[in-house]
Amino acid sequence: MPKDIAIHAAQMAEIAAEAARGYFRGRLGIEFKEDESPVTQADKGVEAKVRDYISAHFPDHGIFGEEHGIERADQPCLWIIDPIDGTRSFLSGHPTFGFLLGHLTDGVPDVGVIGMPALGEVFQGVKGRGATLNGETIRTSNVKRLDQSILFVNEGDKIYRDYPELFARLMDVGQTRRFAYDCYPHALVAAGHVDAVIDYDLQPYDYLPVLTVVEAAGGVITDWDGAPLTLQSDGRVITAATPELHAEMLALVRGV
C-alpha cells in the first residue's frame, strides 16, 4: 500500500509544483488569516488541485489541508496538505518555499513529500523503504556531536520572543549555525547536508509530511520533550541526523 501511495504522492508533487510555479513571482492576491499569516491565490489554487486529485483517485480517503480544512476525517487513511509551506517566502520571491504532502494510515505517517517547486527538487520518504531526492537515495549524516554539527534555527524570532534563555543557549552551540524558516532545512537534514534543526509553532501539515522523509532517511524527529509527533503535538520540533545528536538537542532544550 505505501508503495502505491508513494507513486500517487509523487504525481501530486509534480501537479503542485507546476501550479505553484505558475503563480511564483507574479501578481498575487494576498489576504491575511486571523493569526496575521498571509494567504495567497497560490495557496488556495495549489491545494484545490491536489484535493481534486485525491478525491478522484481516493474518494474514501480523508483530507486535511491548511487552506480548506478537513473532510472525511473519520476515514483510516488521511492525506495532509500544505500547499505553500513558506507563504511569506513565496510572496517575497524567495525560492525556498515548499509543498508538503503526507499520508497517514490509522494515524501513523507512512508516506511524506517535501517538494521545492522553484528548485526542482522532490524529497520523498516511505516508511520502511527509505528516502529519495528526485529518485536518488538519500541518507542523513553520521554527525553525533552538537559541537561538530551544522545547526539550523527555524522561527528564531519566535523562539527569541518566547524562550529567550533557550535562544541564548542556541547561539553558543554547533560548529555552524544558520537562521531559517519552513521545511527546507529539514529536507537538508534528510539529504545529509544539515545535521540538526530546531523548529517552533508548527501545525500538523507542517511537520507530519516532513517526519516521514526524515525518518526514512535515517534521522530522528520528535517534539521538544522527545515524544513522537502526532496530529495532537504542540508544534515544537527537533530534527537530527542521529540519535546521539538528537539526545544532545533535547538536553540543550531542557537546559541540562
Image: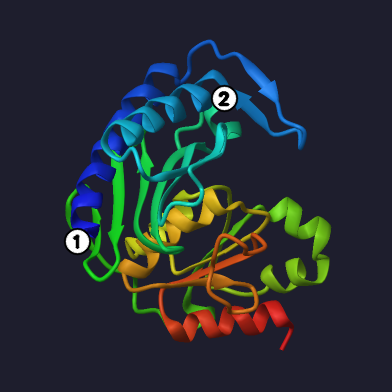
Q: In which quarter of the view is residue 66 placed? A: top right
Which residue type does callout 2 highlight? Answer: Leu
Quarter of the image with the N terminus is bottom left
Which residue type does callout 1 highlight? Answer: Thr
Question: Where is 53 relative to 185, above or below?
Answer: above
Residue 237 at what x, y percent from top left? 59, 65
Residue 162 at what x, y percent from top left? 82, 60
Residue 193 visible to the viewer: no
Circle 2 is placed at which residue position? 91
* Residue name at image x 34 percent, y 36 percent: 54
Q: Earlier in the sequence, mark 1 or mark 2?
A: 2
Question: Where is 104 relative to 141, above or below?
Answer: above
* Residue name at image x 37 percent, y 40 percent: 116
* Residue name at image x 48 percent, y 50 percent: 183
Compute the Cα span from label 1 to label 2. 32 Å
Residue 130 visible to the viewer: yes
> Tag 1's secondary structure?
strand
Q: Residues within 10 Å of mark 2 (few under 14, many from 20)?
A: many
Where residue 137 is drawn, which disc sits there?
1
> Tag 2's secondary structure?
helix
